[in-house]
Amino acid sequence: MTRLSVNINKWATLRNARGGNTPDLLLTATRIQEYGAEGITIHPRPDERHIRYQDAYDLKPIVHTEYNIEGNPIPSFLEMVLKIKPTQVTLVPDGPDALTSDHGWDVNTHQGFLQDVIGQFKEAGIRTSIFLDPDPALITGAVKTGADRIELYTEGYASQYGQDREKAIHPYHETALEAKRQGIGVNAGHDLNLQNIAFFAEHIPELLEVSIGHALICESIEKGLDNVVRMYLNRLKSDIE
Ligand SMILES: CC(=O)[C@@H](O)[C@H](O)COP(=O)(O)O
Ligand SMILES: NCC(=O)COP(=O)(O)O
């Protein structure tokens, strides 16, 4: 059974837009877990444009499901994760000014660096995952880093899904098969949504976890809009009457 971890970055984006505490991130994380999600994911970025480092600390006592912190293991990130000790850390090689994550690790070039940081996280009892492009040839290098899991970068799948979903899933299926063969766990995420998730989960052997954020908040807005507009109209009607 694949676990759903909800990425709450975009709730923080909304909160930061007005400078106050609405929506309340801790309440959001509490509710998401009450609704049945099996994990909370955050991806604090160095510019703190959405999740702030302080949020990562504040969420620790709130997240009683799986707590997954994603990011580039720069020294400040490493220090924070080692202090918080979440369930899982997902290492992502994105630059400080990346709009969003757009590629996985070159596990061969960064082998030594990854082995070092993964060793530190594992010593602290934190499960480790590395963000990876869908290519079976990368699995041997990924295993050598010592990571417990890979997170398949699913942007390519999501963007091709509408044209040819069989073709879109192929490299992911092959990479997951190789991961299974070499005994490393498989997570996935990026641009997964209500349209493309079922097909993905059906075709990836032993998919342990998906983390979903951007689409999930967009879909929540879209699917809740009707209800909320009607609620406002009702409030205004009862004021007049
Ligand atoms: C690793 C990954 O794909 C997600 O964590 C994604 O990068 C979310 O980050 P943003 O919400 O900043 O786009
Ligand atoms: N690891 C992927 C993630 O957390 C969410 O990515 P997205 O759904 O916001 O694209």
Image (cartoon, grey):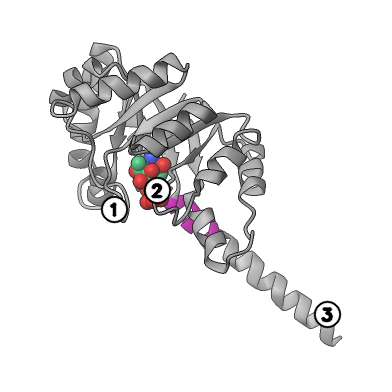
Q: Amino acid at mark 1?
A: Ala
Point out residue 62 in the picture as x, y percentages from the top left corner.
65, 36
Q: Residues within 10 Å of mark 1 (few under 14, many from 20)?
A: few
User: Which one is in front in this view, the residue at disc 3 or the one at disc 1?
Assistant: 1
Front-most of 12 and 66?
A: 12
- Determine the residue located farthest toward the right in the rendered image: 241
**Circle 2 residue:** 45
Left or right: residue 222 versus residue 117 is right
Q: Amino acid at mark 2?
A: Arg
Point out residue 145 in the picture as x, y percentages from the top left corner.
25, 19
Inspect this view and state whether residue 74 appears: yes
Q: Is residue 240 above or below residue 215?
A: below
Residue 117's image quarter?
top left
Residue drawn at x 61%, y 50% as measured from the top left: 25
Tell me the distance, in whole angstroms, between the alpha carbons under discs 2 and 1: 9 Å
Circle 2/circle 1 CB separation < 8 Å: yes
Left or right: residue 191 versus residue 132 is right
Residue 90's image quarter?
top left
Left or right: residue 150 versus residue 135 is right
Point out residue 101 in the picture as x, y percentages from the top left corner.
30, 47
Residue 225 in magenta stretch: no
**Circle 3 residue:** 238
Residue drawn at x 26%, y 25% as measured from the top left: 114
Q: Amino acid at mark 3?
A: Ser
N-terminal of the two: label 2 or label 1?
A: 2
Q: Is residue 105 above or below residue 165?
A: above
Identify the mark at residue 98; answer none if there is no mark. Answer: 1
Specify start and end residues of the magenta stretch as a single range: 214-223
Tell me the distance, in whole angstroms, between the alpha carbons under discs 3 and 1: 48 Å
Q: Residues within 10 Å of mark 2 (few under 14, many from 20)?
A: many
